[in-house]
Amino acid sequence: MNGLILGAFSLSTTFVTLIDISIAFVVILIIYGIRYLISYIKKVDHLERELNDLKKEYYEKERG
């Protein structure tokens, strides 16, 4: 009977460990996703500023 209880206990701790690993993996993926999103937003912002500068140069050139 003790072997059965210990077997069930070790099985449940294995599942808990797998759940903990899964949660940690998801958290790591979320962190990397947020970092990627922030870098993407910065890149888009930089490109938008460059585009605005080019527009200003073009309009100044057209005016004369």
Image: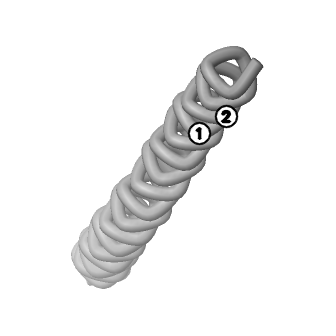
Q: How is the image coloured?
A: one colour
Question: Looking at the image, can residue 51 be seen?
Answer: no
Q: CA distance from mark 1 to mark 2?
A: 6 Å
* Relative image position of residue 24 (x, y in whole percent): 47, 53
Name the amino acid type tagged 2. Answer: Phe
Q: Is residue 32 above or below residue 61?
A: above
Q: Nearer the viewer, residue 54 or 11?
A: 11
Q: Nearer the viewer, residue 24 or 45?
A: 24
Q: Residue at x 24, y 78 (%)?
A: 57
Residue matched to label 2? 9
* Relative image position of residue 42 (x, y in whole percent): 35, 74
Neighbor class of circle 2 (other Cα within 10 Å; few <14, some 14-19, many 20+) is few
Which circle marks residue 54 in the picture? none
Q: Residue at x 53, y 30 (%)?
A: 14
Front label number (1 vs 2): 2
Q: Is residue 64 above or below residue 20?
A: below
Q: Quadrant of the N terminus?
A: top right
Q: Is residue 1 left or right of residue 64?
A: right
Check if mark 1's residue and mark 2's residue have beta carbons within 8 Å: yes
Name the amino acid type tagged 1. Answer: Thr
Q: Quadrant of the C terminus?
A: bottom left
Residue matched to label 1? 13
* Relative image position of residue 46 (x, y in whole percent): 28, 74
Q: Quadrant of residue 7?
A: top right
Classify mark 1: helix, strand or loop. Answer: helix
Q: Nearer the viewer, residue 38 or 43?
A: 38
